[in-house]
Amino acid sequence: MDTLVFTVFALAALIGGFVSGFLGFAMGLVVSGVWLHIITPMQTATLIAGYGLLTQGYGIYKLRHVLDLRKAWPLALGTVIGIPIGVGILAYLNPVHLRFGVGMLLLIYAIYGLARPVFAPLKIGTGADIAIGISNGMLGGLTGLGGVISTISCQWRGWPKDVQRAVFQPVLFIAFVVISLSQAAAGTLTKETLMLYAMGVPFMVAGLWSGFKLFGTIKDETFRKTVLALLLFAGLSLIVSIPPFSFR
């Protein structure tokens, strides 16, 4: 890897770490847009899962004072169930229609949330949480956006920003554990990928640390709107990535 390529790789890691530190998710969404142009898709997917363990583990540690596994376990269980289901049905779905449909749903939800006041808090039971987790895992298996539905469901409850992250970050951590184990079993952990991981760690950690510092200074409403803005970006990225004339 030459100096220019490494600089681009490291800068993406820094920004991805910052976004994860600030919001608690979306590191993969940020870095994949850059890394897919300079390293292989397999390396990108493997690094995102590996760095996901780092970023989510750090977030869980920083939020340990509000961590409540009673709130997180139903979503985590459902996510573990949903991931292989999503991967399994991926072969039977038109990826263009899938990306467009999910992208439009994210756009509608984000625009609606940004245009109106805070959502009225909802009370969601354990059974419904497991179902939400399954949907979360399925979406992850289908599109790679494994934390979107769990993050949205935490917004619905009206929890403070710390509590939201203390729930959806353990869910994401468990999802990355499942993905990493699957990747290891598939033989994607090559020496070259591990070297890339080691080179990117200092930049990912620096971004993560600075993002978490900023997170500590913002209000709950600012956090809510920033999450919605990122979901809007995620929806747009899914739609824009569809090749022209794919619906023909």
Image: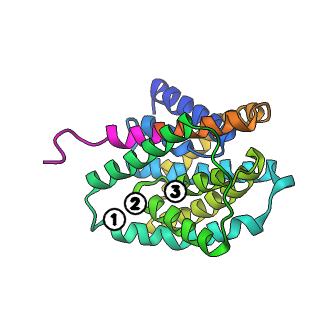
Earlier-in-chain disc, 1 versus 2: 1
Q: Is residue 157 above or below residue 89?
A: above
Q: Estimate the x, y position of residue 14 in percent, counting from the top left.
A: 61, 32
Report the residue that reaches farthest toward the right: 65
- Residue at point 41%, 55% (across, down): 143
Residues under labels 1 and 2: Cα distance? Answer: 6 Å
Query: Is 99 part of what is drawn in magenta?
Result: no
Front one among 225 and 201:
225
Left or right, residue 142 beside residue 221: left
Q: Is residue 82 above or below residue 180?
A: below
Question: What residue sits right under mark 2 in the picture?
Answer: 142
- Residue at point 68%, 39% (across, down): 21
Label 1–label 2 contact, CB within 8 A: yes
Label 2–label 3 contact, CB within 8 A: no
Callout 1 secondary element = helix
Q: Is residue 41 visible?
A: yes
Q: Is residue 77 above or below residue 149?
A: below
- Residue at point 27%, 51% (across, down): 96
- Residue at point 60%, 48% (across, down): 51
Left or right, residue 65 beside residue 105: right
Residues under labels 2 and 3: Cα distance? Answer: 9 Å
The three-letter amino acid code for the residue at tag 1 is: Leu
Q: Quadrant of residue 198?
A: top right
How busy is the neighbourhood of tag 1: few (under 14 within 10 Å), some, or many (20 plus)?
Answer: some
Question: What residue sits right under mark 3 in the picture?
Answer: 146
Q: Estimate the x, y position of residue 32 in percent, counting from the top left.
A: 45, 41
Question: What residue sits right under mark 1 in the picture?
Answer: 90
The three-letter amino acid code for the residue at tag 2 is: Leu
Q: Which residues are magenta?
A: 233-248
Callout 3 secondary element = loop
Left or right, residue 129 beside residue 211: left
